[in-house]
C-alpha cells in the first residue's frame, strides 16, 4: 500500500523539480520531453525508487532520472532533426 501512495507523490515532485528554466519549449521539444519520460531508460531508473523512508536514495535517483531523461530527450530531438539546446555534457551531482 505504501508503494502505491509513495510512487505517484514522488512522480509529481520529480516533475515539478525538473521544470526547465529559460525560454519555453516548442511543441516539438515538449513532445520529445514527454517521449523521454516514457523511455525505457527513464522507466528503468524509476524502478529503482525506494519507497521506504528509512533508506534514502533520493539524491542518486534524482540525478539518474535527470540524466536518463536528458539523454532520451536529446536523442529524440536529434532523430527529429531539431537543434539540441545546452552545453556539451549533462551536469551530474556528487
Image: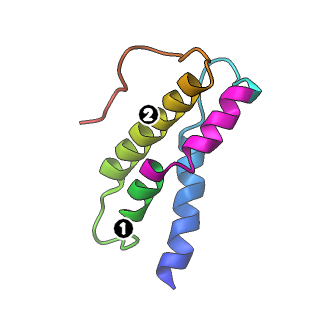
In the image: residue 69, left or right of residue 82: left
Outermost left residue: 94
Q: Position of residue 60 (x, y in %)?
A: 30, 49
Q: Report the Cα–Cα distance between label 2 and label 1.
A: 23 Å
- Residue at point 60% right, 36% down? 19
Helix or strand or loop: what does disc 2 sit on?
A: helix
* 31 shown above or below 56: above
Within 10 angstroms of label 1, few (less than 14), some, or many (20 or more) residues?
some
Q: Position of residue 21 (x, y in %)?
A: 59, 24
Which of discs 2 and 1 lies nearer the camera? The answer is 2
- Residue at point 36% right, 45% down? 64
In the image: residue 62, left or right of residue 38: left
Identify the image's colour scheme: rainbow, by chain, secondary structure or one colour.
rainbow
The answer to which of 44 and 4 lies nearer the viewer is: 44
Q: Position of residue 45 (x, y in %)?
A: 39, 55
Which residue does the numbered mark 1 point to in the structure image? Answer: 50
Q: Which mark is residue 61?
A: none
**Most common secondary structure along the magenta stretch:** helix
Magenta range: 28-41
Q: Quadrant of residue 28?
A: top right
In the image: residue 91, left or right of residue 76: left
Q: Quadrant of residue 89?
A: top left
- Residue at point 55% right, 53% down? 13
Does 53 appear in magenta? no
* 48 shown above or below 31: below
Which residue does the numbered mark 2 point to in the structure image? Answer: 71
Within 10 angstroms of label 2, few (less than 14), some, or many (20 or more) residues?
some
Q: Quadrant of residue 27?
A: top right
Amino acid at each position: 500500500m505504501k508503494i502505491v501512495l509513495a510512487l505517484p507523490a514522488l512522480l509529481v515532485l520529480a516533475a515539478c523539480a525538473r521544470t526547465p528554466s529559460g525560454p519555453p519549449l516548442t511543441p516539438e521539444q515538449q513532445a520529445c520531453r514527454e517521449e523521454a519520460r516514457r523511455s525505457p531508460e527513464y522507466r528503468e531508473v524509476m524502478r529503482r525508487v525506494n519507497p521506504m523512508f528509512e533508506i534514502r536514495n533520493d539524491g542518486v535517483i534524482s540525478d539518474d532520472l535527470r540524466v536518463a531523461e536528458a539523454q532520451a530527450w536529446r536523442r529524440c530531438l536529434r532523430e527529429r532533426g531539431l537543434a539540441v539546446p545546452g552545453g556539451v555534457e549533462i551536469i551530474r551531482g556528487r
